[in-house]
Image (spheres, coloured by chain):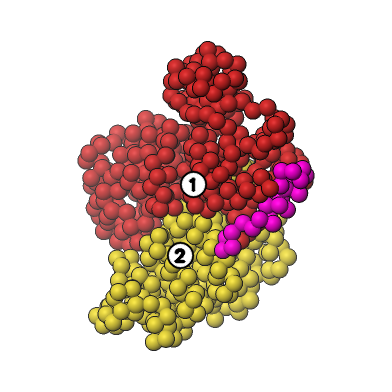
Amino acid sequence: MKLHEYQSKNIFSKYGIPIPKGRVTTTAQEAKQIAEELGGLVVIKSQVLVGGRGKAGGVKLAKDPNEAEQLATQILGMEIKGLPVRKVLVDEASAIDQEIYFAITDDRASKKPIMIASAAGGVDIEEVAAKTPEKIVKVNIDPLLGLREYQARDIAVAIDLPRDYWRDFTKIAMGLWEVYKNTDASLAEINPLVITKDKKLIALDGKMMIDDNALFRHPDLAEMRDTDEDAPAEIEARKYGLSFIKLDGNIGCMVNGAGLAMTSMDVIKLFGGDPANFLDVGGGAGAEKVAAAMRIILTDPNVKAVLFNIFGGITRCDEVAKGILVAMDEVKPKVPMVVRLVGTNAEEGRRLLENANMITAETLADAAKKAVAAAKG
Amino acid sequence: MSILVDKNTRLLVQGITGNEGLFHTTQMVAYSNIVVGGVTPGKGGEWVLDGKIPVFDSVKSAKEATDANATIIFVPARFAPDAMFEAADAGIPLIICITEGVAIHDMMRVRNYLDQKKVRLIGPNCPGLLTPGEAKVGIIPGNIAIPGNIGVVSRSGTLTYEVLYAMKNLGMGASTCVGIGGDPVNGTNFTDVLEMFEHDPKTEKVIMIGEIGGNEEEKAAEFIRTKMTKPVASFIAGQTAPPGKRMGHAGAIIEGGAGTAADKVKALEAAGVKVAKHPEEIPTLLQ
């Protein structure tokens, strides 16, 4: 789950990381009011969960409250990469001397958290990593021990931070570690962390991602979820515990197991078709879940055929068949359906679907070929 | 011979009285007689499966009574980390965690703790292990595989079943099938298992089933190129997966342009691995 900049920075602030004064709002009038309170130059920043806001014109400098209102009106009417801007953050503007990149994230390779810093901050860190990897400093953190202060100092030295800032930087690093650890973040990023003209370190921008699997112990964070960037079908699927991702093709897929679901998409493509979605009904899916999955697939008007590929293990094929029948009765689909049932109770499942007017297949390759042919009509 | 589990394995089931635990214990016991006990705190002294399997309150007491040398975990995700710590502290050398959805921070702590204790973890979010004809430790359906000389290692569950089933239809059997799981931080990786297969006299060929995300397949390719003498065939799932989207498994995501199927296929082919276009084709590459 991604958090907005204002949400991330509010969390940073609670852990003692300095952030600019400012507030989030949904209206231009309030943006003006905030600018009046702050006085002086302010930055109006669109709050959307995609990168590249600045380049898209979603971050603007305003010299007075009237201009703040005007720019907020403009930004609140924008769409950035297809996402409507519903909120803007109004922050006091900072006079910047230097921009630093600083983050803590999960490192799959070492199975440990990793702290990443670079004196080349403010820009896309992946670009820095690709072009000038020597400008990036990385230190692994022992998850059982936590970040040690000397490690933070080592980082400060490695990015050539002047000695005067070491103490403040260490405090920020320890704060960011606490943020990362206490929120089950998969990413806690400050980009840029700036040195201002008046010699202060401030987290100008913030980005956080929270591990969905840990949200059970963070109900407060779970409430912050912004579903704007998710397709409505993906939100619906989440309610039923289905893993669903909408794609651009025309063959709907319902599969049990994530690896097999990806593979079914691949095999459809291999035989000249285009998958309309990724959908994993999960292990042990019952009739109700299967029916929900089928409704979600069939709400996509692009879908010209549906492929069911079920390899019964924990999942019982007869349960899946019952779900298909329930959904067929309810949705009355007009598109052809190809079904392949193998494994636990497959025969019983096939018998249930005998009169359902579905195309049957023995192997995955065979099923994919038939679905591709059916979608072509 | 086989790797990790065989007919001499003495297995505990953590979460044995839960729905999943009990169902799969029944299946495992029906396959072979390796389950020596179960653990559910608060239910010590009870018996399951018509008095065949004793239940204990803790892994420690279960180990003392049964001399178990492996444990399988079926407890919900929020309790799974504690179950793994408990098993490690009780001195169980092999832990198989089936549970899906364990938080990654928990897994980093578990993995680093287990490494210090030299405990082998398989999973989490995995289907477990199957040594056909000898031991079923997990949820892989027993009837889809026959004994043989092919070692199988995979990040996926049902996709592995697909491959085992295709092998069986061609009369090809498995020495051991290892599901290492689809999480970004897990206990055992491809290279670990490939090394075990390389040293296992019963394994003559290997099938490795990978997917998008991370770089374990690339590391495995390097191991195969430099250290392996046995032929390897592979399949990588997720060739059509869009970047930035998590494809069900927490670990199956293309991030910052890394972890694509194309990169993995390229690395494997450069190491002399035959890579199949679809899963049913894999066994034919080893015929």
Q: Is residue A157 above or below residue A123?
A: below
Give yes or no for residue A177 being in the magenta stretch: no
Q: Which residue is under mark 2?
A: B81
Query: Is A241 positioned to the left or the right of A326 in the image?
Result: right
- From the top left corner, tell me how far across and down residue B277 is, in percent: 56, 51
Q: Local crowd at mark 1 within 10 Å, few (<14), some, or many (≥20)? A: many
- From the top left corner, tell me how far across and down residue A157 is, in percent: 76, 49
Query: Is B7 positioned to the left or the right of B115 in the image?
Result: left
Q: Give A339 or A28, whichever is nearer the viewer.
A: A28
| Residue B242 visible in the displayed image | no
Q: Which residues are magenta?
A: A143-166
Q: Quadrant of residue A307?
A: top left
Q: Which chain gets the red colouring?
A: A
Q: Which residue is under mark 1?
A: A210
Q: Secondary structure at mark 1?
A: strand
Q: Quadrant of residue B64?
A: bottom left
